[in-house]
Each structure stands twice: as C-alpha cells, then as structure tokens.
Amino acid sequence: MRSKATVMVTLVMAAILGVQHVNGGVPAHHLLADPSLPVLSNWWGLLTLPLLAWFLLGRIERRRKANPLAAHGDFAAFTGALVFGAVLSLLFTAGQSSATETMVLSLGLLAVFYPIHRAACVLGFVIGMTWTFGAVLPMIAAAIFAAAGAAIWYGVRFVYARALVLRR
C-alpha cells in the first residue's frame, strides 16, 4: 500500500505541476505571504510531497499493524483533514481572512477532542492544501499545527490524569 500510494501522490503532484506549467507557469509563494521573505516554488512539491507521503504512510502502516481497528479511523482522519485543508485553501483564495483565522483557531479546540497530530491527519491536510499553496508551505503549517495539536492532546490528558490522582 505504501509504495502504490506514494507513486499515486507523485503522479498527482506531477499532474498539478503540469497543469500549472501549461496555464501560465508554476507559481511560487512567499513564506507568510510576505514579499520580504524567501519564495518557494511549487516545483519543490515533486520532491517533498512524495517523501512526506512515504514517511507518513510508513507510520500509518505501523499503527495499523499494532491496532488493526485503526484502519477505518485513519481513512476518516485523512478524509476529514483533506477536506479541512481544501476548504481552508479555498477560503484563503477567496480572501475570507476571518473565516480562515477561525478555522485555524478551531484546530486548538479540535485537538482537545481528537488527535490531529496523527500521520493520517497531517497527510490529508497537506494534500488538501497542495493545489493552492504547493506542498512546502502546507508541510510547514502542518508541522506547526501537529506540534500544537500534540501538545494540547497530551497536555489536556496529563492535566486531567493529575487532577484525578489529586482527587483521590
């Protein structure tokens, strides 16, 4: 599954770049949309997205071997994150900055109840945003959101467990 999925991700990224190349050129994006910061070409996605997919699919496979029931949850997590990333991209493109800010802030609340730091979520989010932003910027955003999500997920559980111990 890992190899086939990685090849599929590579082909999709190549198709996206081909469409962009034919329709005016492959875009590049400034970090934080600030022209004074470095620019990253979408061409980097042809290298980075397959590597990310290979790595994360390996983590998903290890998780599925340890817990075979996780397969359905991983697919749902991937799909939900894919839709979330695509909607976030569409709202950004449409200039809906307040809606995008709300969606980004909602990740903190979502992380209390769901482990958004898992590999399936990260991969879905990055792929969902790739058409709009290339692969590198969504990977950076996903790394930040996953780290914050893991801190929230484990932090809340740690505090809750400590509160239960102190209550006894």
Image (cartoon, rainbow, N blue to C red):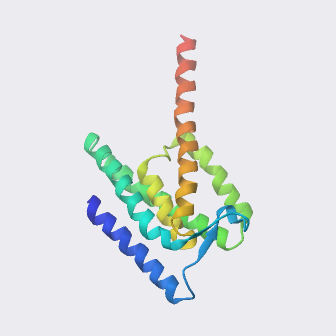
Quarter holding residue 155: top right
16 is higher (above) or lower (below) than 136: below
User: Residue 42's spot in the image, x, y percent?
Assistant: 53, 72
Q: Quadrant of the N terminus?
A: bottom left
User: Residue 74's spot in the image, x, y percent?
Assistant: 38, 52
Q: Report the front residue among 160 and 116.
A: 116
Q: Outermost residue toward the top?
A: 168
User: Residue 161's spot in the image, x, y percent?
Assistant: 52, 22
23 is higher (above) or lower (below) than 43: below
For this view, does 69 lie left or right of residue 94? left
The residue lying at 38 percent from left, 50 percent from top is: 73
The residue lying at 37 percent from left, 68 percent from top is: 9
User: Residue 16's spot in the image, x, y percent?
Assistant: 46, 78
For this view, does 79 lie left or right of residue 107? left
Quarter holding residue 12: bottom left
The residue lying at 54 percent from left, 43 percent from top is: 147
The residue lying at 32 percent from left, 44 percent from top is: 63
Q: Report the front residue among 75 and 7.
A: 7
Q: Report the front residue among 73 and 105.
A: 105
Quarter holding residue 96: bottom right
The count of marks equals 0
For this view, does 121 lie left or right of residue 69? right
34 is higher (above) or lower (below) than 166: below
